[in-house]
């Protein structure tokens, strides 16, 4: 080694960005990360990485860390003033004293914990136990509520369990791919590369893409269905209507493995091709082609994401797509099945440990008394509270109303990412005590914190994550923590133990975890006999080879795909058809707000850009925020490329350049979700300062999944007058 250079080492870990969950190999010299490459043995990516994954090491250099990271605990003595550094002991004492005080004065439901699909499973497990087992509140929810709660609800309603039945390898076996509500080319790049390769290898494979926007994903389509925003349920019912009419369903599969088909059949009778073509803005002949390819292909795989999930009809959209698979027997065989893609790297892990307001450990339901009793016994507490917790939107609304008085936010940035920012900011200002546990001091939510707790991040953490195909991978540390940062699970344990001394003094600790593995082992035990049973796995096995759940004790490896025997985890073993009608958007276009605004990802940015925004090269693809409009809409409004426009909804307004995009339909607008306060400022309807596209979005949500309709808001677009 050259003089002065430390020992070189390589560490296998997992990319912290999207739900594909690619394996990475981190090179480090002991002092800093010097490179990253794809892990050739990881089954999610076989060595490939996208632009975000392949530049990870550049986001973790000492220079970037110095500028972006939160490196020591800080307390804001007075709101509106800069925070001051304090010791960890003082910070942990303050956190536990204020939380315990609020619990004692107002009850446990005056506290809310808001977590993240980017936390590791071990972090999630401790937070969930802290809220539901120690504090006695179910007010623990996560930004995964904004990401996949409709997929959870859709799976449970139809298949009986929150378990994606397919896997990435099914892309290579499919003869028909139905990609709906997903721009996988940007949101899941390495999986999309697999789709492209499968199409190249098998040109006969039919690819149908249904999306209001003609995205880069749609460029691969043999059939593109530019459906009107929010019309997905009508589309799926219309396809089933045609399949029934043409005799393309699978009556033997329906009879042997499902229930509720007659009710659904009666419902879809009214979804004629004529009416559906009109509701969806599609051509009748395209509906017939899509129905035929889907139903008659030897194997049809649906890939879907936020276009279905982030909707006030999110559960219905998920469930009615699954109807099509059940009606045609396109499930439980290689290359076939409904396959929801998770946006975040560990949205799945959060579901597994029950890190949502309505769930408990190992896919147990809070509403089920037997499940509550099982979890209470597992944790060694008298009971788990019955009262449902507040979900993401409800939690911030409750804080804005003064009902929730303490917010503890970990690894997520609601001051940018939650819909209807005016409410969120009011919540953060009104709450008596706000803890922000964060790796990045640049996150907008840090500005609202009374107490800032510095957390470790990618390259420094140990634990596990689960990707979209149920595959659990190890996340491993290549470097020690930056500054005084501590691991998220450790911070939760330290606060929990101080809370115990105040709330249950003299009793043995419920949080005696020396390592992340000890947390994972307790989680593993909780899965015994459940649909996601992982009692056959170990950290050591996962380090050598990531595995898909379930893998019960005695099984050498995890299950590649589910329901191959046609038996579903319902009371009678049958999958259930969902007879749910099409419902209109929460906020349809109207004369004063004539555009349908949708939001989505860029290829090279991630969430609020706290990490990707540090790299100039990741702005090469898209350099600045724009609102994209159809060229005819630009012309009608006298807009030229780059003209500044006000985009205004009932909740707020932002100013940004207009850009024409022929991929959009008429009266549609698109703004990327990533741009934060430093790029895109605006005002609420009453003049408060706001930032980003969520100044405009609505917090209306699906009544079943409580997932907000981030994919649609009615807006107007007016040319900005320059003074
Ligand atoms: Fe990371 Fe997703 Fe890119 Fe894979 S596809 S390298 S997980 S961002």
Image (cartoon, helix red, strand yellow):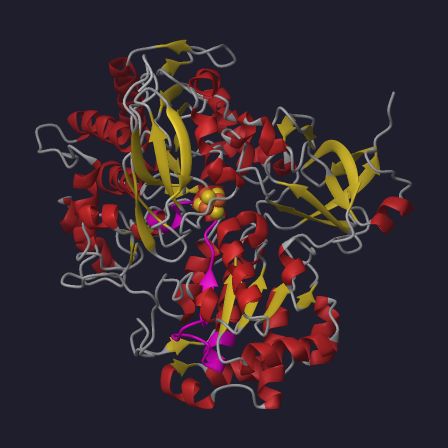
- In depth, the one of 239 and 195 nearer the eye is 195
Q: Is residue 666 left or right of residue 147?
A: right
**Relative height, residue 191 to residue 477 (above, below):** below
Q: Is residue 358 visible?
A: yes
Q: In the rendered view of the protein, which quadrant contains the N terminus?
A: top left
Q: Which of 681 and 671 is in front in this view?
A: 671
Location of residue 129 by image quarter: top left
* Residue 286 to residue 187: above or below: below
Residue 304, compared with residue 419, is above or below; it is below
Q: Residue 468 versus residue 199: which sits nearer the camera?
A: 199
* Residue displayed at 46% across by 67% down: 172
Query: Is residue 431 among the parts visible in the rendering?
Result: no
Q: What segment carries the magenta color? A: 324-349
The percent position of residue 624, horizontal first and vertical second, equals 69, 32
Q: Magenta span has 254?
A: no
Residue 254 screen position, x and y as percent: 43, 85
Total labels drawn: 0
Residue at the location (29% across, 36% down)?
A: 476
- Image quadrant in which you'd find residue 125: top left
Asked if the magenta segment contains residue 329, the reply would be yes
Q: Is residue 75 left or right of residue 666?
A: left
| Residue located 59% across and 58% down the image | 181
Q: At x 38% / y 14%, what residue is drawn?
A: 74
* Coordinates of residue 139 in the picture (x, y in percent): 36, 41
In the rendered view of the protein, which quadrant contains the C terminus? top right
**Location of residue 170 in the rendering, given as x and y in whole percent from the top left corner:** 43, 67
């Amino acid at each position: 080694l050259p003089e002065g250079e430390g020992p070189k080492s390589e560490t296998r870990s997992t990319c912290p960005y999207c739900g594909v969950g690619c394996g990475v190999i981190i090179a480090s010299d002991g002092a800093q990360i010097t490179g990253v490459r794809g892990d050739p043995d990881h089954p999610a990516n076989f060595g490939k990485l996208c632009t975000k994954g392949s530049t990870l090491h550049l986001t973790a250099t000492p220079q970037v860390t110095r500028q972006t990271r939160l490196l020591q605990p800080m307390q804001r003595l007075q709101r509106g003033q800069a925070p001051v550094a304090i010791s960890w002991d003082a910070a942990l004492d303050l956190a536990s004293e204020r939380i315990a005080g609020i619990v004692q004065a107002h009850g446990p439901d005056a506290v809310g914990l808001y977590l993240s699909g980017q936390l590791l499973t071990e972090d999630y497990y401790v937070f969930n136990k802290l809220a539901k087992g120690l504090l006695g509140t179910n007010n623990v929810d996560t930004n995964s509520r904004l990401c996949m709660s409709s997929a959870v609800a859709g799976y449970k309603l139809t298949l009986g369990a929150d378990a994606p039945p397919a896997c990435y390898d099914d892309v290579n076996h499919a003869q028909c791919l139905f990609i709906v509500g997903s721009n996988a080319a940007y949101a899941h790049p390495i999986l999309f590369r697999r789709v492209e390769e499968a199409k190249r290898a098998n040109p006969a494979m039919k690819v149908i893409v249904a999306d209001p926007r003609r995205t880069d994903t749609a460029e691969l389509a043999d059939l593109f269905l530019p459906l009107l925003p929010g019309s997905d349920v009508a589309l799926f019912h219309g396809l089933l209507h045609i399949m029934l009419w043409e005799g393309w369903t699978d009556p033997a599969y329906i009879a042997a493995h499902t229930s509720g088909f007659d009710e659904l059949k009666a419902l879809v009778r009214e979804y004629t091709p004529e009416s559906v073509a009109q509701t969806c803005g599609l051509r009748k002949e395209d509906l017939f082609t899509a129905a035929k390819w889907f139903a008659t292909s030897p194997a049809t795989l649906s890939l879907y994401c936020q276009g279905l999930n982030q909707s006030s009809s999110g559960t219905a959209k998920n469930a009615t797509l699954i109807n099509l698979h059940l009606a045609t027997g396109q499930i439980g065989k290689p290359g076939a099945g409904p396959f929801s893609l998770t946006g975040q790297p560990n949205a799945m892990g959060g579901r597994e440990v029950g890190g949502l307001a309505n769930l408990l450990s190992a896919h147990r339901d809070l509403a089920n008394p037997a499940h509550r009793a099982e979890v209470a016994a597992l944790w060694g507490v008298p009971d788990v509270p019955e009262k449902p917790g507040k979900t993401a939107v409800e939690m911030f609304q409750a804080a804005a109303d003064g009902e929730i008085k303490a917010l503890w936010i970990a690894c997520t940035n609601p001051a940018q990412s939650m819909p209807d920012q005016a409410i969120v900011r009011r919540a953060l200002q009104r709450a008596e005590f706000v803890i922000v546990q964060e790796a990045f001091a640049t996150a907008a939510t840090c500005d609202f914190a009374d107490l800032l707790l510095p957390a470790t991040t990618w390259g420094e953490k140990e634990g596990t994550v689960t990707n979209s195909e149920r595959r659990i991978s190890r996340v491993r540390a290549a470097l020690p923590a930056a500054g005084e940062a501590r691991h998220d699970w450790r911070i939760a344990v330290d606060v929990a133990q101080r809370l115990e001394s105040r709330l249950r003094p003299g009793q043995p600790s419920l949080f005696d975890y020396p390592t992340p593995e000890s947390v994972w082992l307790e989680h593993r035990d909780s899965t015994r006999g459940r649909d996601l049973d992982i009692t056959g796995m170990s950290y050591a096995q996962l380090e050598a080879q990531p595995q898909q759940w379930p893998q019960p004790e005695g099984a050498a490896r995890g299950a590649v795909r589910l329901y191959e025997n046609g038996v579903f985890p319902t009371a009678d073993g049958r999958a259930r058809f969902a007879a749910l009608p099409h419902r209109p958007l929460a906020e349809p276009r109207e004369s004063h707000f004539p555009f349908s605004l949708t939001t989505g990802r860029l290829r090279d940015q991630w969430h609020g850009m706290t990490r990707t925004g540090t790299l100039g090269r990741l702005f090469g693809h898209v350099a600045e925020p724009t609102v994209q409009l159809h060229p005819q809409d630009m012309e009608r409004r006298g807009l030229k490329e780059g003209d500044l426009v006000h985009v205004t909804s009932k909740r707020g307004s932002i100013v940004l350049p207009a850009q024409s995009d022929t991929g959009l339909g008429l009266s549609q607008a698109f703004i990327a979700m990533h741009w934060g306060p430093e790029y895109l400022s605006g005002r609420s309807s009453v003049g408060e300062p706001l930032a980003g596209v969520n100044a405009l979005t609505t917090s209306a949500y699906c009544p079943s999944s409580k997932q907000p309709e981030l994919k649609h808001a009615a807006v107007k677009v007016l040319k900005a007058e320059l003074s």
